[in-house]
Amino acid sequence: MAIVEDEAVEEAADAENEAPDNDASRDNNEYRDAEMPLAFFRPMLTTDDKGNMTFSFTAPNANTTWKLCALAFTDDMLTSTMSREIISNKPVMVQPNLPRFLRTGDKALISASVMNNSDDSTAITTVVEIFDPATGAVISRNDFSDNMAPGEAKVVNVTVDAGWDANMIGYRIKAGNGRFTDGEQSVIPVLSSVTPVIETKPFYISPDSTTFTMQLPEMPSDARVTLQFCENPVWYVATALPGLRNDDSESALAASAAIFSAAVADGILRTCPEIAEALKEWNSSDRSDSTLVSMLERNADLKTVLLNSTPWVMDAKSDTERMTRLSLLFDRKVINDTYSRNIDRLSKLVRNGGWTWIDNIDEPSQWITENVLLTMGHLKQLGFLPDNNRLRSMLDNAVKYIDRVTQEEYAKYPDGDYYYYVYLRDFYPDIKKSTTLSSLTSREVQRIVKEWKKRSIPVKAMNAITLKNHGYRTLATSVLASLNEYSVSNPSQGMWWPSLDDMTTWSMGKIGATSIVLDAFAAIDPQSPDVDKIRQWLILQKEAKDWGTSVTTSQAIASILLTGSKWTTPAAKATLTVNNREVNAGKTDRLLGYFRENISSMSPSGATLYVEKSGKTPSWGAVYCQYRSEMSEIKAASCPEVSIDKALYRRVTTENGVTWQNADSLKTGDIVQVNLTITVKRDMDYVAITDDRGACFEPVEQLPKPLFSEGICFYRENRDASTNMFVTHLPKGVYRLSYELYVNNSGTYSSGIATLQSQYAPALSAHSSGSMIEVMPQ
């Protein structure tokens, strides 16, 4: 293959830019656009009978290096490639350094390089014009004259003020020596320095409280203030039911999870008919703001980021689809088909009594078998196990398999810890144990009696249930007292265990562990007031977390709905007043008691919010204040659950290496590190962080990439005027995120704020303060 390049391209380009030696011709030269298009692309080319190919093209008017790439192949797929670089330049060249945008009130010093690319000294005249792109009217003109040596470049500077009424600013530069000219023009968008701000104040009311009072903060007079309130959020737990899992996996765990989810959902609807009636009511609504719509899709006007601008569009659709599929729970045929299909799957995976993970494995797995038995054991305990002879037979054989494997382990390791086996085996008391395993059980119970104090919170809870099952009810009560000592509780948020905070490997870890503790309290002392306190904390977690479709989700929902006081009742009427004026709630959900109302006309700034309710369930609400303000005037704001702080540091290179200093003074060419410090005091999902950049900055790394802090992955992407970060699961803790920017232009600029908000629970939000940035020339 031979490729012949047309060298006349560059000669023609130079001829086009050669002008007669008079001013009029130089004034009429064309300005090239700053955006460089693709120079040449032709996927189909032909060759002559000798295999030679000739082609020509006109390069765009741009001073740059073009890379020409070609691929050729024959009929029998022999291939060859070629790559060449083509430099497109002129004897006189200009290259402006423009910001991507400006904000109103910014004052930018825009620099441009003027180059003498010829072999002779020459006098070059440069004209820079600032113009109105809408009308073409010239706002200002700056003329420069320089005698320049061969290969010399000089910088010309022009100050540009972004007016308060400007939407865009035109910039053009041309330079010529009487024979050759070059010019470039561009339009700089002007963004408003007045930015939307959202500040929130969430609140929570305990089940035994009938009144609540909260002082609202000072708010701008033109702010839009929204009051959101949910009198009985336990119904949100009902909407979290996984229902019928649409899982194509052929594994034993997937099959048991599908049976468990369907059986729990079906059993809860039978046990609590009021939940079934609620689902029917929500399904028959117009779905404009139905409860059976994902939290990600609701309350868009209260969020800082559009859903389509986040990575969670499919998550929102999946969550809404899951809730829509809850209507299938009323179809007995669909439920029975789910049981039958997944019992068939389990039967195909039986190996020597136990279950294997997938079908192409010949040996049973003890771990898989234990997990399936535990899942089915919970169903059996709840009374929701499907009435199926094949399933019962498989469970009997699986228990005997676990007995056999455990007895073999016990023979090899008589001093091992077998508390989990005893806990699991107690779900199946009707299957007789061997003498050896009965002895092991008695020995393990005695070990628990002696060693339970040394164990973790979830293991203590399991040990308490084991002690209760084996007649040690008094000691089991003592274990609950110990668990109580390690807990934290307050009236508004219930009771929880801080030592479980490190269970962040997946979203439901802490919730699942707390559900085990709840089961222990409910089994040993069902009348304890702590049962409702634990349930209260679990319900509040649903406000900010998507519980997904795992087995743990179904188990947690069953634990909440089937223990303690009966909270699945229609919401009692609550009265809310602002400044002693009653809030007239519009559309209110009958069961949740949920509504949102614009209270801007009630003078909420600094007012007192008073809530009076008669319901005996936990409640939550929030006040949203939305307003617009100059970036430089915005003060930092946070809510008790989350805060964010933004700081800039300048990179300094010394003999001892690179250090970072406070960015008190900046100059063009500096590298600045943006540090965002996020403090989160509760777990939350779907968190979006938006950091508005000053117009003088340009990201060092242009491509999206993950950022890691404390083991959590944040996805970062650059936009023209901001840097966005997204994290799907954010456990409570302190996180430090950093990225680097080049200082691109000198001048005075507005520095935007950094905003954090849970897109699942928009009441959890915070933002940093704004400021002005001054950049000195190099």
Image (cartoon, rainbow, N blue to C red):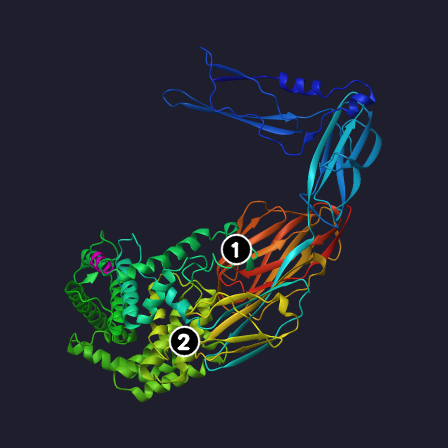
Q: Report the residue at 70% width, 19% height from top.
A: 16
Residue for badge 2: 535
Q: Does the image show residue 650? A: yes
Residue 284 x/y as whole percent: 36, 60
Residue 462 x/y as whole percent: 33, 77
At mark 2, the secondary structure is helix
Given the current orientation, which residue lies at the most extreme bottom position? 474
Amino acid at dot 2: Arg
The residue nearer to you, when weighing 228 against 751, is 228
Mark 2 burial class by Cα count in 10 Å: few <14, some 14-19, many 20+: many
Q: Which residues are magenta?
A: 335-341
The residue nearer to you, when weighing 238 against 402, is 238
C-alpha span from label 1 to label 2: 30 Å
At mark 1, the secondary structure is strand
| Residue 726 - label | 1
Dot in front, 1 or 2: 2
Residue 362 x/y as whole percent: 20, 55
Amino acid at dot 1: Phe
Rendered view: 246 above or below 488: above
Q: Is residue 481 left or right of residue 309?
A: left
Q: Is residue 473 magenta?
A: no
Q: Report the residue at 35% width, 82% height from top.
A: 451
The residue nearer to you, when weighing 491 against 34, is 491
The quadrant of the picture occupied by the C terminus is: top right
Examine the image and state in which quarter residue 99 appears. top right
Q: Earlier in the sequence, mark 1 or mark 2?
A: 2
Which secondary structure class fits the magenta region best? helix
